[in-house]
Amino acid sequence: MSERQDRLGFIGAGNMATALVKGLLQSETYREDQMLVSDPRPEALEAMRDLFGVVSLESNREVVKACGTVLLCVKPQQMGDVLEGISGAVGAEHLVISIAAGIPLKMIRRYLGEDVPLVRVMPNTPALVQAGASALAPGPGTARHHLETAEKIFAAVGETVVVEEDKMDAVTALSGSGPGYVFRFMECMVAAGAAVGLEQETARRLVLQTFLGAAHLAKESPDSLSRLRENVTSPGGTTAAGLSVFEEMGLEKMIREAVAAACRRGEELGRRY
């Protein structure tokens, strides 16, 4: 593999790029000198250099010319300008990975051409602590080795799944927005604990560890989620009393409608492009 093909370029030095660089270094997937970063904010580049020792460049085109794999870690509203700026410098020898929410691959192809291998990724914010969930959708003509490269990168910050691009709005509604739902549920749990007499900080610590422990148990256990719920629900007990309120007030319907609403909004935003 050539030196260029062995390099990974980041266009954008925000939170997700920072999380990826950290995870890739910790997992020894890439070295510091193999990762190049560009960003219009000098302070962001300085922070990346100070934290991780990666190479910083002033120009997006310089990153593209120096790297075989390029991650577009920019906000959706910035994507058009970024793509226009690197158009002509990207070719079939590159792999371009986009994490911009709502930006379809067809828009990227309009700027970069039909022959550029593309992968669209929807990560989520727990990637910031190497516990993310990322869905990857390869573009037409993207080879298996390109997808494996993308999977290797995002496996450094959590779990990965592969989906068709037409499922990305559903992914965004479920795992992309999902941390927001969980944080809101946790807020309500803390408030509920305080309402029955616990100190706010005590309630917060209990809720955080309960969610962390329950998620870890669910991931490690061979039992289904339903079985795990049943295991902690004694007939006539306290958990049963709490769950009965969820059922009476329509928790499942509420969650279904929330995810459906987020999915519809994702579809609406995607139609802009």
Image (cartoon, grey):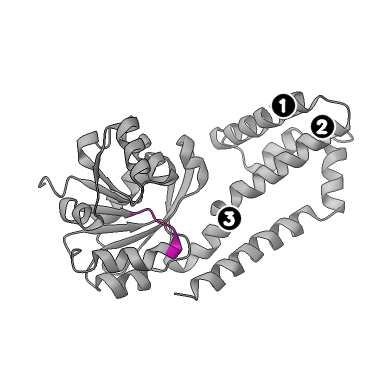
Which of discs 3 and 2 lies nearer the camera? The answer is 2
Residue 94 x/y as whole percent: 20, 59
- Which class describes the residues within 10 Å of circle 2: few (<14), some (14-19), or many (20+)? some
Residue 77 shown left or right of residue 194 in the figure:
left
Dot 1 amino acid type? Leu
**Reading the chain from its start, which is encountered first: label 1 or label 2?**
2
Percent from the top left, x then y, of residue 11?
Answer: 31, 53
From the viewer's side, name the closer residue of 251 and 267: 267
Do the CB atoms of the residues marked 1 and 2 lie less than 8 Å apart? yes
- State yes or no: residue 64 in magenta: no
Question: Label 3: few (<14), some or many (≥20) within 10 Å?
Answer: some
Marks 3 and 2, how far apart in space?
27 Å
Picture coordinates of residue 261, whole percent (x, y): 66, 65
Residue span colored magenta:
72-77
59 and 179: which is toward the camera: 59
Mark 3 residue type: Leu
Rendering quarter of residue 210: top right
In the rendered structure, which disc, 3 or 2, sits on the residue that comes first in sequence? 3
Which residue sits at x=20%, y=36%? Answer: 33
User: Residue tagged by mark 2?
Assistant: 193
Under tag 1, what secondary structure? helix
Using residue 174 as the reference point, say whether residue 84 is left or right of it: left
Judging from the image, what secondary structure is the residue with disc 2 in? helix
Q: Which residue is mark 1?
A: 206
Residue located beneath label 3 in the image: 174
Q: Nearer the viewer, residue 84 or 204?
A: 84
The one of 111 and 241 positioned closer to us in this rendering: 111
Q: Are marks 3 and 2 in contact (CB under 8 Å)?
A: no
